[in-house]
Amino acid sequence: MTGSATRTVTVVPLTADHADEVVTIYQAGIDEGNATFETVAPTWEQFDGAKLPEHRFAALDEAGRVLGWVAVTRVSDRCAYAGVVEHSVYVHPDARGRGVASALLKALVDSTEAAGIWTIQSGVFPENSASLAVHARAGFRVIGTRERIGRHHGVWRDTVLVERRSPHIG
Ligand SMILES: CC(C)(COP(=O)(O)OP(=O)(O)OC[C@H]1O[C@@H](n2cnc3c(N)ncnc32)[C@H](O)[C@@H]1OP(=O)(O)O)[C@@H](O)C(=O)NCCC(=O)NCCS
């Protein structure tokens, strides 16, 4: 992909056809050091097994290349939390700053609300100002900062818990 990639973004269900690009974009975000505690991207099989099949999307350019993806996991097996999911959103470094994450989050909100899911949450490193901005723009609110919640390359790090509570459910 080049920096002159086209401007048109189409959001489609994420399938095995997108596997290699999804994993590559995941690893690019990981390598920047402020996206996740993970240090190695999962294989497609691990990703596919962990993420809910109904609520995963890829953003494509006009040539069908993957610009970014969003996917969710359930946070709990307890029925009280049946409508609560945790999401990840990753955009190719060359495709940032032109609304790809916003388009993916809109698709995710529409899809989860249609399925009766009422809360989407995520943990964001406080240093990840792009992610905090994207989530604020998408209607997520900051719940608070979880202090020294996990170790990343041996260093204790905080996360900011963000959530979007659907106004349409309940
Ligand atoms: C965070 C990330 C997904 C944002 O993707 P993106 O496609 O560049 O974001 P968008 O272009 O949709 O931006 C949405 C809004 O956030 C703002 N924003 C995006 N990046 C920003 C930055 N670096 N600083 C300030 N604001 C930023 C945009 O200005 C836009 O606001 P606007 O609609 O009012 O103009 C992308 O930087 C990324 O993939 N990072 C690595 C992986 C990662 O950290 N994922 C999140 C894990 S919690």
Image: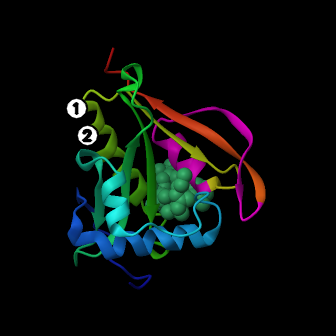
Residue marked by disc 1: 114
Looking at the rendered structure, the secondary structure element under dot 2 is: helix
Callouts 2 and 1 close, C-beta under 8 Å = yes
What span is in magenta? 130-154
User: Height in image: 25 above or below 81?
Assistant: below
Left/right of residue 139 with respect to residue 158 in the rendered view? left
Residue under the point 30% across and 62% down: 59
When the figure is inspected, residue 111 is found, relative to residue 165, above or below; the finding is: below
Task: Tell whether position 141 is magenta.
Answer: yes
Instruction: Tell me the quarter of the picture where residue 159 sits.
Output: top right
Q: Which residue is mark 2?
A: 111
Residue at 39% x, 60% y is 100
Q: Is mark 2 within 8 Å of ligand 1?
A: no
Q: Is residue 101 magenta?
A: no
Q: Could you tell me how far apart the alpha carbons at marks 2 and 1 are, in whole angstroms?
A: 5 Å
Inspect the image, locate mark 1, and give the three-letter code of the amino acid beneath it. Ala
Residue 147 horizontal/vertical position (percent): 76, 40
